[in-house]
Image: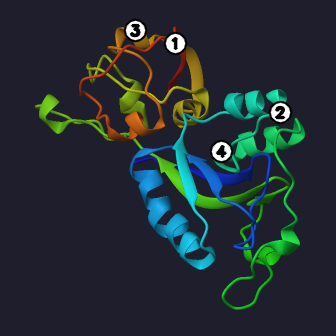
Amino acid sequence: MKKSLLMSTIAAAGILAASTAFAGNLTVVSWGGGYTKSQVEAYHKPWEAMGGKEINSEDYNGGLAEVKAQVEAGKVVWDLVDVELSDAIRGCDEGLLEEIDKSILPAGDDGTPAKDDFLPGTLVDCGVASIVWTTIYAYDKTKFSGAKPATMADFFDTKKFPGKRGLRKGAKSNLEMAFLRRTFTKCWEPKKALLGRSLNWTQSKATPFGGKLARNRRKCWPMVKS
């Protein structure tokens, strides 16, 4: 099964909280669902126990629109936001995020300074990488009596494998999957293969290929061949 490795970054929106010495409570924003629940258990609760402060956890659907609106209005209520790497870089370039002093980041367990302890490219001016994640596709095996999808090319082959598809609402991951088939040839029209709207990040994780979906509004995706 083909996978696409990506990185999620914690970026500082308005104020950076770098230690338990931070004066007030924090509002931390992430993607919701089981992902946020894991962060609450692994990050939020231990931090609260150490410093006696509280974390207010909020969900969003990604992007910088809400961050930009808060900054431009002068009413920033989010402190830390889980964003994709590209948004961390763009938000920093546009002055929407605070730069992080790498010297205040804690050293690794063996004492290695943070700037040398992280993987190359995972510390950016306004963000600190928190996870490496993957994009995969899944299908409902009960919908296929004969041959079953086995490659990313099969996902885009609606003639060989008819049925509804669900894609995350955004081109980044979808184009990476399309590029795995190497050569662009034409446009693939989701309206012929999808029933309903595009899925947000949490929904797309839970919806199998061949399952029931909502309407996709995007008119055309690049179609490629092997």
Q: Amino acid at mark 4?
A: Glu
Indicate which disc, 4 or 2, sits on the residue closer to the N terminus.
2
Q: Amino acid at mark 3?
A: Lys
Residue beneath the point at 45% across and 52% down = 35
Q: Amino acid at mark 1?
A: Arg
* Image height of 104 relative to 74, above or below: below
Disc number placed over residue 84 in the picture, else none: 4
Q: Secondary structure at mark 4?
A: strand
Residue underneath mark 1: 218
Which residue occupies the extreme bottom position in the image?
A: 110
Crowd around label 4: few <14 · some 14–19 · many ≥20 (10 Å)? some
Question: How far apart are the two marked residues, 1 and 2, measured between alpha carbons?
Answer: 33 Å
Q: Secondary structure at mark 1?
A: loop
* Image height of 55 relative to 111, above or below: above
Q: Are marks 4 and 2 in contact (CB under 8 Å)?
A: no
Viewer-nearest of labels 3 and 4?
Answer: 4
Residue underneath mark 3: 191
Question: How far apart are the two marked residues, 4 and 1, measured between alpha carbons?
Answer: 22 Å
Q: Amino acid at mark 2?
A: Gly
Question: How far apart are the two marked residues, 2 and 3, measured between alpha carbons?
Answer: 41 Å
In this view of the protein, which residue sits in the foreground, 45 or 148? Answer: 45
Indicate which disc, 3 or 4, sits on the residue closer to the N terminus.
4
Q: Are marks 4 and 1 in contact (CB under 8 Å)?
A: no
Residue beneath the point at 71% across and 50% down = 79
The image shows residue 89 at horizontal and vertical percentages of 80, 44
Residue underneath mark 2: 74
Question: How far apart are the two marked residues, 4 and 2, measured between alpha carbons?
Answer: 24 Å
Location of residue 63 by image quarter: top right
Indicate which disc, 2 or 3, sits on the residue closer to the N terminus.
2
Location of residue 53 by image quarter: bottom right
